[in-house]
Amino acid sequence: MLDWVGSLRIHERSQQRVVLGLTRSTRVAGWVLMAVGAWLTLLVWTLSAWLAMVPLAIAALGMLLATLRRQLVFDREGGVLRIDQSAFGVASRAVVPLFHLRAVVVIAREPGLPGWRRIGPRRYVAYVERRVGEAIYLDEATRCARLLRLAEAITDLTDLRLEYDATAV
């Protein structure tokens, strides 16, 4: 339902690089949540300071979404993947050589915990598998078409293998 919040899109695609970044709707949703949470906090504060904690948490979640930044740059010329992320103004950067990457994977996951009754639609997860270290999470969605476009753009540029598994794990 909220697949558009925090999802990656292709911002630039050329023969030498692919730039993925968060959508603008993530920032807009964050500012709206923050405004609504702040307004509700002011209304509820007159009733009880303890009750005001709930809308204050909503405003904090909105602030997180509004300040969230994520950009992945696959650069063929430089031979690297640059990952820039920040939240609340605190940034983290990483550079991974392309030869450390093994494949781009899009896989289906059933909702819920193993052995429990499954409620909700199947989710698809896209990530970049590394030769050494943990996978680099790209995105997830209820439909796989957008994730496959992301994966194909990356594999076209980097010559990585594309692994697609539609059977639920």
Image: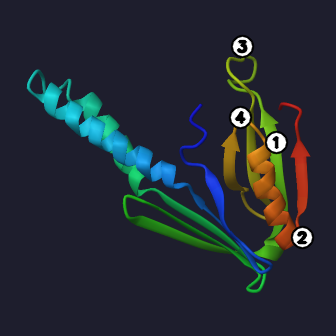
**Eye-nearest disc, 1 or 3:** 1
Q: Is residue 137 above or below residue 122?
A: below
Q: Which residue is mark 4?
A: 142
Q: Residue at x 68, y 43 (%)?
A: 140
Q: Residues within 10 Å of mark 3 (few under 14, many from 20)?
A: few
Residue type (three-letter) at the residue carrying disc 3: Arg
User: Which of marks 2 and 1 precedes in the sequence?
Assistant: 1
Give the Cα distance between marks 1 and 4.
Answer: 11 Å
Residue that mark 1 sits on: 107
Q: Which mark is residue 117?
A: 3
Query: CA–CA distance between discs 1 and 2?
Result: 19 Å
Instruction: Tell me which corner region of the image, top left, top right, bottom left or bottom right, holds residue 143.
Output: top right
Task: In the rendered view, tell whether residue 32 sits above or below residue 132.
Answer: above
Element carrying mark 3: loop
Q: Amino acid at mark 4?
A: Thr
Front-most of residues 162 and 112 = 162
Residue corresponding to mark 2 = 159
* SS type, badge 1: strand
Q: Earlier in the sequence, mark 1 or mark 4?
A: 1
